[in-house]
Amino acid sequence: MNALAAIAGQEIRAGLRNRWAVATTLLLAALALSLVLLGSTPTGTVGASPVAVVVVSLASLTIFLLPLLALLLSFDAIVGEAERGTLLLLLAYPVSRWQVVVGKFLGHASILALATVVGYGAAGVLLAITTDADAEAWATFGLLIGTSILLGMAFVALGTLASMVRERPTAAGLSVGLWLLFVLLYDSTLLGLLVVDQGTLVSGRVLDALLLLNPADAYRLVNLTGAGAAALLTGMSAPGEAGQIPTAALYAALAAWIVAPLAAAIAVFNRRHP
């Protein structure tokens, strides 16, 4: 455990030195505060909770922005060390290969989690000052922050897996491809499949399973189609039976998207040389 803490701490200190943590926090805070200020405008017309408006806006923003930040943060976790010539030195210490991978993952995930909590927390503070929300609304906002951290961790794990290649440009290309696939192309392809299929082959259960195969969709379903004011505001009852997917299954999908890529990265790293 000391080795894990040391490697994770090294990554956190590196993120602080190169201003990654500061820049990410400021970006998330600026966007979140902007959405709070803009989101309060329609509430007087439609009677929606200001917190619900902000949750819907932040969730939509998070799906696009947080995976990209996570991949940019972690795509060179291993290949960057190899290109700098420090990987052999790191492996010369009394640490296991899995500890190197997990330690780097924990460091990058901690940076992103801190940026998310501080950035979105700043929006929460402004909401608390300017609105009078009930406990349910704040629970929804807390859920947004927690699931955003899980989504970031899933894409940090994917970025760590992408970093197992031999060249940094290849890792960067893979990371961009992963972002395009899960954030843009997957749902577009799924929608096209539903239009062509017309319900003949893709049943509700199959659609549920397909949605769980994308961490961004699992995140979206938790925050935008569950119970509460946010679901009422979006008017989203997810396609097919998606709105009926148990909440536990959605959280399990997010957890699987953290564990599976990380386990794959460890397996690949154990086989590579050095």
Image (spheres, rainbow, N blue to C red):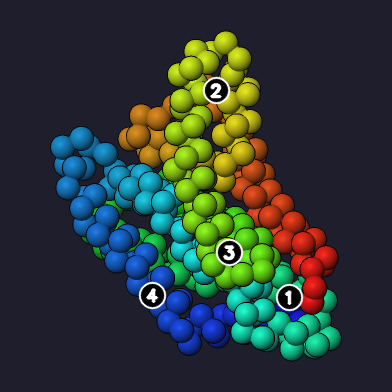
Kindly identify the amino acid type of the residue bearing the numbered disc 4. Answer: Ala
- Quarter that holds the C terminus: bottom right
Kindly identify the amino acid type of the residue bearing the numbered disc 1. Answer: Val
- Of circles 4 and 3, which is in front? 3
The answer to whether residue 200 shows anywhere in this view is yes
Residue 240 spot, x, y in % from top left: 51, 21
Identify the disc placed on residue 23.
4
CB under 8 Å between discs 4 and 1: no
Above or below, comparing residue 9 to residue 164 in the picture: below
- Of circles 1 and 2, which is in front? 1
**Gap in angstroms between the C-alphas marked 3 and 1:** 18 Å
Kindly identify the amino acid type of the residue bearing the numbered disc 2. Answer: Glu
Q: Which residue is mark 2?
A: 241
Identify the disc placed on residue 171.
3
- Of circles 4 and 2, which is in front? 4
Going from N to C along the chain, the mark reached first, 4 or 1, is 4
